[in-house]
Image: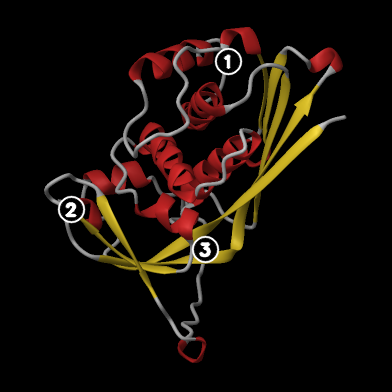
Amino acid sequence: MMSCFEASAPGKVILFGEHAVVHGSHAVASSLDDLRVYARLEIESGESQNMLRINLNDLGIKCSLKISDLVIKNKDLKKEQGPPRSDVLKKAHNILMNLKYSPEKQSALLAVIYLCMELCPLSTGVYLQVVSAGLPIGAGLGSSAAFSVAISAVLLAACGVEEKKLINAWAFCAEVILHGSPSGLDNAMSCFGGHALFVRDTTCGRIKHQPLCVEPQHNIYLLITNTQKLRSTKKLVQHVA
């Protein structure tokens, strides 16, 4: 009998303080619950028993990797928020070198491979599929964070873990791979949802997340327009000082 796990995560919109939050300014953000990334994980048997199959629909990525190449030592699901382990990331990068994709696609796939190595139960075949439902890529609406949260959540669910703090910590790890020095706002917003105030703690460098209560009669209605112009969060953050 095949086991199946599913998870989804919303995009986000930053109302105030976008990018400047990286340098200590306050930011206010809201989740976009109708714009989500969906992840599905299936535990397989038969011919696919020794393979990890990855399908990232919106990025046009399909690949199969030998599970024996992905096994690592000293797995620990109880991660504090921080960067990826350098030795595991190096191994993931070496695996990626055999796959021919553009730099943008390689970055996304590297994050997925890293998370699978750290979190995925690799004792049998695994099929991981990720789909974006209306959440545009590169539009500043947190698509990469929703991508990271959804994948982290579905992999942890396969391990019997649903703790949001851990999902957020692993999603931030993927965001580091994708963006270099993320603030942590996007993944926190996608993971915890709702509305929140963010500020970076200058003593430890971490972003503090304070939920904001908005009464139903005071709901905020936003009109969001997609200009179709792709943006790189990594490049934009580097220009905010």
Residue 97 at x, y percent in the picture: 50, 12
Residue 52 at x, y percent in the picture: 68, 20
Residue 170 at x, y percent in the picture: 44, 37
Q: Nearer the viewer, mark 2 or mark 3?
A: 2
Q: Secondary structure at mark 3?
A: loop
1 and 3 marks in contact (CB < 8 Å): no
**Amino acid of disc 3:** Asn
Badge 1 or badge 2: first in the primary sequence: 1
Distance between mark 1 and mark 2 Cα atoms: 39 Å
Distance between mark 2 and mark 3 Cα atoms: 32 Å
Q: How many marks?
A: 3
Is 76 situated left or right of 201 in this image?
right
2 and 3 marks in contact (CB < 8 Å): no
Distance between mark 1 and mark 3 Cα atoms: 32 Å
**Amino acid of disc 1:** Leu
Residue 141 visible in image: no
**Amino acid of disc 2:** Asp
Residue on which the image places disc 3 = 226
Residue 151, above or below 112: below
Q: Secondary structure at mark 1?
A: loop
Residue 104, above or below 63: below
* The disc label shown at residue 99, or none: 1
Q: Nearer the viewer, mark 1 or mark 3?
A: 1
Badge 2 or badge 3: first in the primary sequence: 2
- Crowdedness of circle 1 by 10 Å Cα count: few (<14), some, many (20+)? few
Q: Residue at image x 59%, y 26%?
A: 120
- Crowdedness of circle 3 by 10 Å Cα count: few (<14), some, many (20+)? few
Q: Report the residue that reaches farthest toward the top.
A: 68
Residue on which the image places disc 2 = 201
Residue 13 visible in image: yes
Query: Which of the 4 image quadrants contains residue 48?
Result: top right
